[in-house]
Amino acid sequence: MSKKKVVVGVTGASGAIYAKVLFDRLVELDAQTRDVGVVFSSNAREVWKLELGNSDFEKLPFKVYSANDFMAPFASGSAKYDTMIVAPCSMGTMARIATGVSNDLMTRAADVILKERRKLILIPRDTPLSLIHINNMKTITEAGGIIAPASPSFYSNPKDFEALAKTVVDRVLDLAGFDLDSFRWSDKENQ
């Protein structure tokens, strides 16, 4: 398996736990990555502090780029990042991606991933959805992106919020092509 170059975008949508668990899992999967670049939206850090009660985003073992750093390697297709995950993905960010508005590094990176026909996975965490949201999801799906809603599974009997969030993150990492140990549904395991 070749090592992956991954971009992680974190927006100010509620659901910072998904970003935290994703970063934890990427640390565990370090042998499968060649590079992980990170970009936070302007509100993402504030939501993280509010929801998780810490500033652990300042201690990430990955390179974090400014939201306005268009010189970041993943702002160009020539850098060959193969996957971008936006966790959580706000509806505003999703709308900008769907309409091709590349007004910051996150939306530019998503635009690059789509134009290069690579893997874009968005984790929206919002309810209810308006028809505008649904149409934006449809547009991104038709462009080759994957919408993976933050809909945790319960059949693994998660014991806490992190374990619950991990059910979503592990599914997303499966979609991204990582080889990982995760709870798998099967008749044998659930008998």
Image: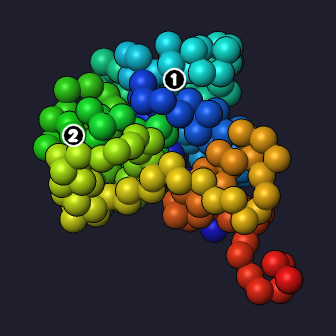
Residue 84 visible from this viewpoint: no
Q: Earlier in the sequence, mark 1 or mark 2?
A: 1
Where's the C terminus, which quadrant? bottom right
Between the residue at mark 1 and the residue at mark 2, the CA separation in whole angstroms equals: 23 Å
> What color scheme is it?
rainbow
> Residue beneath label 2, please?
95
Residue that appears at 65% across and 45% down: 165
Give the secondary structure at mark 1.
strand
| Kind of residue indicated by mark 2 | Ala
In the image, is 39 to the left or to the right of 28? left
Horizontal and vertical percent position of residue 173:
59, 56
> Residue beneath label 1, please?
64
Q: Residues within 10 Å of mark 2 (few under 14, many from 20)?
A: some
Horizontal and vertical percent position of residue 60:
65, 24
Give the secondary structure at mark 2.
helix
Q: Residue furthest front?
A: 128
Residue 146 visible from this viewpoint: yes
The vertical placement of 3 against 73, above or below, is: below
Residue that appears at 73% across and 72% down: 184
Along the viewing direction, whichever of 46 and 7 lies nearer the viewer: 46
Query: Which marked residue is nearer to the observer: mark 1 or mark 2?
Result: 2
Q: Residues within 10 Å of mark 1 (few under 14, many from 20)?
A: some
Horizontal and vertical percent position of residue 157:
79, 58
Residue that appears at 78% across and 41% down: 160
Horizontal and vertical percent position of residue 61:
67, 27
Along the viewing direction, whichever of 51 and 46 lies nearer the viewer: 51
| Kind of residue indicated by mark 1 | Val
